[in-house]
């Protein structure tokens, strides 16, 4: 890799010496997967860190979404957002369910509660919102709608590790929330993920489903999948949990710097922190109004790229624009005007714990000029 290259993110890695100690322990025990020592420790540590009661670890952040829909026996149609990473909608498709796209709120980028009810049909059984960039959804209003129509709510909380509102984990909302621990996320286990639910019986069922449906040595209760996290990654995750607060505070300082310097730059907008919310600063999206800024989003994106700064256009194109989904009635630009506007104007700036202050200066100089 070019030393001058600035990437959008960089993985948080635990110190190698600490990790090798854990590896020796795993080698000695010869218990390398299937709910081992480190797996149990990590579940417990994450419950404490996140402020939730029941968590199940997974091999990635997509399988808990697929498993959540199975566990809640969701069928028919699911209302979801097009402004997300493609795995959100894929999980619905993998269950043979029809995704129904609803537009987003420009204040947060999240599913707009005002537009959900109009999309409900007799076939609707659930809502799958995303806390995009870690901005909490309007969980009260979504729950109110879900209760009124008897729907389940599954939050894709892949961006919302550690996010709290009024001191309460955002993962407490809905029936189930899921996390991704992919290398690019705020907290990673290289690949990995988790499912958060709110009662013991549900966790038990989730743990069957992620282990082929086994409910004992000889009994299989469902066509479950294999999505168990192994001991090596659980140990890595346990170590990384010690450093995640440092990573989040480093991200926060960078976000503050970006906001300070971009304030008042004509044609550029960004999100402010929300009242009462503990953010995790997982992304720093800016939105370009080409008319006012003088350059289009793509012109700025390419200019940065030409200068070895690799920003990303999350989330462009919209999920509803991909070939698998663009034929759906709900996938039209007329149905999703806000999502289209956001997707066509967004750039996520580099943001990670290792970003140096002269890198930040270089990025800002290019944007502000
Ligand atoms: C990263 C991500 C996922 C998928 O997680 P993986 O761990 O990569 O499988 C799902 N939803 C959203 C919104 C994501 O950003």
Image (tube, rainbow, N blue to C red):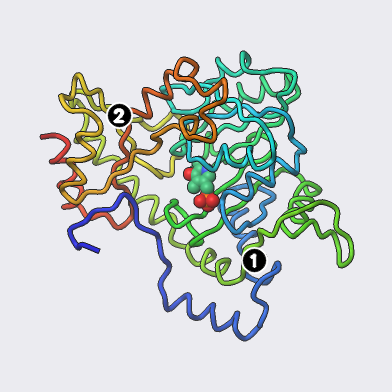
User: Which quarter of the rendering shows the C terminus?
Assistant: top left
User: Which quarter of the rendering shows the N terminus?
Assistant: bottom left
Instruction: Pinpoint residue 194: horizontal percent, then vertical percent.
Output: 61, 52
Q: Nearer the viewer, residue 161 or 27?
A: 27
Residue 34 in which image quadrant: bottom right
Residue 287 circle label: 2
Instruction: Pinpoint residue 66: horizontal percent, then vertical percent.
Output: 66, 45
Q: Nearer the viewer, residue 169 or 220?
A: 220
Q: In what element is the residue under mark 2?
A: strand
Instruction: Pinpoint residue 285: horizontal percent, then vertical percent.
Output: 34, 36
Disc 1 under 8 Å from ligand 1? The reply is: no
Labels 1, 2: front one: 2
Q: Dot 1 corresponds to which residue?
A: 39
Q: Residue at x 38, y 32 (%)?
A: 273
Q: Is residue 160 visible?
A: no
Q: Residue at x 25, y 23 (%)?
A: 289
**Above or below, 87 relative to 10:** above
Residue 63 circle label: none
Q: Nearer the viewer, residue 54 or 85?
A: 85
């Amino acid at each position: 890799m070019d030393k001058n290259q600035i990437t959008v993110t960089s993985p948080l890695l635990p110190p190698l010496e600490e990790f090798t100690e854990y590896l020796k322990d795993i080698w000695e025990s010869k218990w390398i997967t299937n709910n081992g020592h480190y797996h149990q420790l990590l579940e417990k540590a994450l419950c404490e860190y996140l402020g939730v009661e029941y968590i199940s670890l997974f091999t990635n952040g997509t399988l808990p979404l697929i498993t959540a829909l199975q566990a809640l026996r969701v069928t028919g149609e699911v209302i979801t957002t097009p402004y997300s990473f493609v795995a959100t909608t894929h999980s619905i498709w993998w269950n043979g369910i029809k995704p129904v796209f609803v537009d987003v709120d420009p204040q947060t980028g999240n599913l707009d509660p005002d537009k959900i009810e109009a999309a409900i049909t007799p076939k609707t059984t659930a809502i799958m919102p995303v806390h995009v960039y870690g901005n909490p959804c309007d969980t009260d209003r979504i729950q109110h709608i879900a209760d009124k129509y008897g729907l389940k709510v599954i939050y894709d909380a892949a961006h919302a590790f550690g996010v709290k509102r009024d001191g309460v984990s955002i993962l407490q909302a809905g029936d189930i929330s899921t996390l991704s621990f992919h290398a690019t996320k705020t907290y990673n286990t290289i690949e990995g993920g988790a499912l958060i639910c709110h009662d013991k019986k549900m966790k038990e069922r989730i743990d069957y489903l992620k282990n082929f449906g086994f409910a004992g040595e000889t009994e299989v209760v469902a066509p479950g999948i294999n999505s168990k996290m192994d001991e090596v990654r659980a140990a890595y995750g346990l170590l990384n949990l010690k450093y995640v607060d440092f990573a989040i505070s480093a991200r926060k300082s960078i976000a503050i710097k970006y906001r300070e310097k971009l304030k008042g730059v004509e044609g550029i907008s960004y999100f402010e922190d929300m009242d009462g919310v503990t953010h995790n600063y997982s992304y720093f999206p800016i939105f370009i109004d080409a008319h006012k800024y003088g350059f289009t989003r793509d012109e700025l994106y390419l200019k940065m790229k030409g200068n070895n700064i690799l920003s990303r256009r999350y989330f462009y194109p919209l999920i509803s624009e991909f070939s698998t989904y663009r034929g759906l009635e709900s996938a039209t630009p007329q149905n999703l005007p806000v999502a289209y506007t956001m997707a066509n104007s967004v750039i996520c700036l580099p943001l990670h714990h290792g970003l140096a202050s002269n890198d930040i200066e270089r990025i800002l100089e290019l944007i502000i000029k």
